[in-house]
Amino acid sequence: MELVNDRNGAYSRRYSQIEFNDLDLAQLFSIFGIVLSAKVFIDKITSLSKCFGFVSYDNEISAQNAIKAMNGFCIGNKKLKVQLKKC
């Protein structure tokens, strides 16, 4: 996953093709603060994850803490890449 922050959000990329939905993403990142939204992007044709998503927090500190803690975190056999959203 790659988590990117749109100020108070984080963007997440590189999770494997395991079953992983919006709720899973929100729960995974909720330990860092109040998650306002979490979205896993799904391919409309294959119904498989596109291996990226976005997480938004209610404040920038939570997003920064998530980035620091989750960058390099493993899900399945994949390491997450967590960073601020590039505008």
Image (cartoon, rainbow, N blue to C red):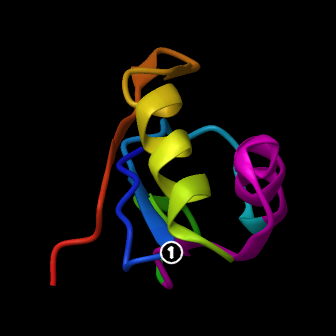
Residue stretch rendered in magenta on the structure = 23-44
Q: Where is residue 64 in the image (x, y as percent from the top left)?
A: 45, 50
Residue at the image position 47 percent from the left and 14 percent from the top: 77
Residue at x 55% of width, y 43% of height: 66
Foreground pick, 62 / 18:
62
> Where 6 sits versus 46, above or below?
below
Q: Where is residue 37 in the image (x, y as percent from the top left)?
A: 70, 79
**Could you tell me how many numbered marks the image carries?**
1
Closer to us: 57 or 71: 57
65 left or right of 33 in image: left
Residue 69 in view: yes
Task: Identify which amino acid the numbered label 1 is placed on.
Answer: Asn
Q: Find residue 87 and report its image quarter.
A: bottom left
Could you tell whether 86 is left or right of 34 in the image? left
Residue at the spot of label 1:
8
In the image, residue 24 sits, relative to residue 55, either above or below, namely above
Q: In which quarter of the image is residue 75?
A: top right
